[in-house]
Image: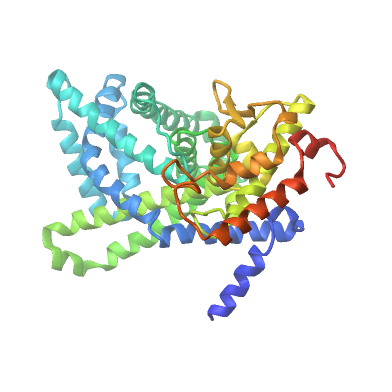
Amino acid sequence: MKNTLEKIEDFFWESNLRSLPFWRSVSARIFRTIYVVVRDVNQGNLSLNAMSLVYTTLLSIVPLLAVSFSMLKGLGVHNQIKPLLQNILAPLGEKGVEITEKIIGFVENVNVGVLGILGMSILIYTIVALIYKIEKVFNFIWRIDKNRPFVRRFSDYLSVIFIGPLLLFLAIGTTASVMTSPFVQKLSDISYFSIIVDSTTQSMPYIFIIGAFTFLYILIPNVRVRFTSAFIGALVAGFLWQTIGWGFAYFVVSSTQYATIYSGFAILIVFMIWLYLAWLILLIGSSIAFYHQHPEYLNIRKREQTLSNRLKEHLALSSLYVITQHHFQGKPAWNGNGLAQHLGIPTKVLSVVLDILKNNGLLIKAGTNEELYVLAKAPETIAIKEVLDTIRSAEEDKYFNLQTLRFNDKVTELMAVADNNTEQVLKKCTLKDLLLKDSLF
């Protein structure tokens, strides 16, 4: 069985996606996406983050709904919170209705107007901490090491808190008004159009779920997410939400023994399980959106990939080659993501090599809105041997290098001969020669 699985994996991973025929490329991409998402869940990358978000949600759900409730109350649409919450907790069945009543009761007991500055500050901080935690998890999925700056974090988060619910209920209200309008009602009396109206009405929950997920996948990560990638991730997550929701509803109905064992705690345990599944579904959708936008990560089986010295040398010269090519052609400078996709290598892996070249004065970063890589010196002054030496000595420091460590004299002599031979072969070849000459030898 194991050998069969390995053969299947080798069949889909045997070459780069771009070198495969169309049908093989599509099937391999789908298989690899399923494989890497299941791998991330199995290794705990997604499941552990979903568990941590359950705890954060339990602490923050009442403050979040209280702020939304107080804002929507001024607009006269606060009564829509309860039906929305019931729809989210629908897989819990009767327990979902009970939990909704309890949460709404807690929210109504929170009087934002009399909290004072300190109380309101704590309320806002709790909500911001929840969104910050969500951003960190999404950034982890998208391989982003930097979160939003502190000032931008508060401005973006507060926009989500205050404007997000308004847009959501505005969309729901507008849709309800259109579906109940006299014109639509007259169309529903016609047999042909009644099928369309009924289908549209039944598909509205799916549309709102997919739309909400797409909005979150675009907004939350601290990186530009393409709409197509976000929509594909949301489409899969929306399907999983409905499918797993039906299965969980059946589980709740058929698991009466849990109420007997856990008594009054049963409702809390069921609620936490559904929260975990809900967050896991949301994170799986975000992961699919990431792999769709960055197919170069589908060329490797492990989430974290290390580079051999040989790969570092090839990547360094390949990166400098295409950067020099744009330099001579007068084209815009490369950014990290574009360069990684062009070379078919994960951005995080390539950034290791680019940082080495930058730290050793071969590349500099330019640009204001995004980091662009340009040559630090004229290409005719950058020797190929200098690039190779830079990569080879990248991890050395003044306390741990060839001069401070003692080696066997014969080994030292052998390595010196090898270096001299390399220098003789490359002679004075530069980046300009690599790009413009038909042959270097």
Q: Can residue 193 be seen in this view?
A: no
Closest to the observer, 139 or 101: 139
Where is residue 356 shown, x and y percent of the image?
55, 39
> Can you tell which quarter of the image residue 353 is in?
top right
Residue found at x 50% / y 34%: 223
Vertical arrangement, residue 188 with respect to residue 405, above or below: above
Where is residue 45 shown, x and y percent of the image?
40, 54
Furthest residue toward bottom:
1
Vertical arrangement, residue 411 with respect to residue 425, above or below: below
Where is residue 259 shown, x and y percent of the image?
17, 64
Query: Is 127 on the left or on the right of 199, as rendered?
Result: left
Residue found at x 40% / y 53%: 46
Residue found at x 39% / y 59%: 246
Residue found at x 80% / y 36%: 433
Closest to the observer, 380 or 65: 380
Query: Is 48 on the left or on the right of 229, as rendered?
Result: left
Colour scheme: rainbow
Q: Is residue 179 visible?
A: yes
Furthest residue toward front:
409
Vertical arrangement, residue 354 with respect to residue 410, above or below: above
Closest to the observer, 271 or 329: 329
User: Tag count in the figure?
Assistant: 0
Where is residue 157 shown, x and y percent of the image?
35, 27
Quarter the N terminus occupies: bottom right
Vertical arrangement, residue 236 with respect to residue 433, above or below: below
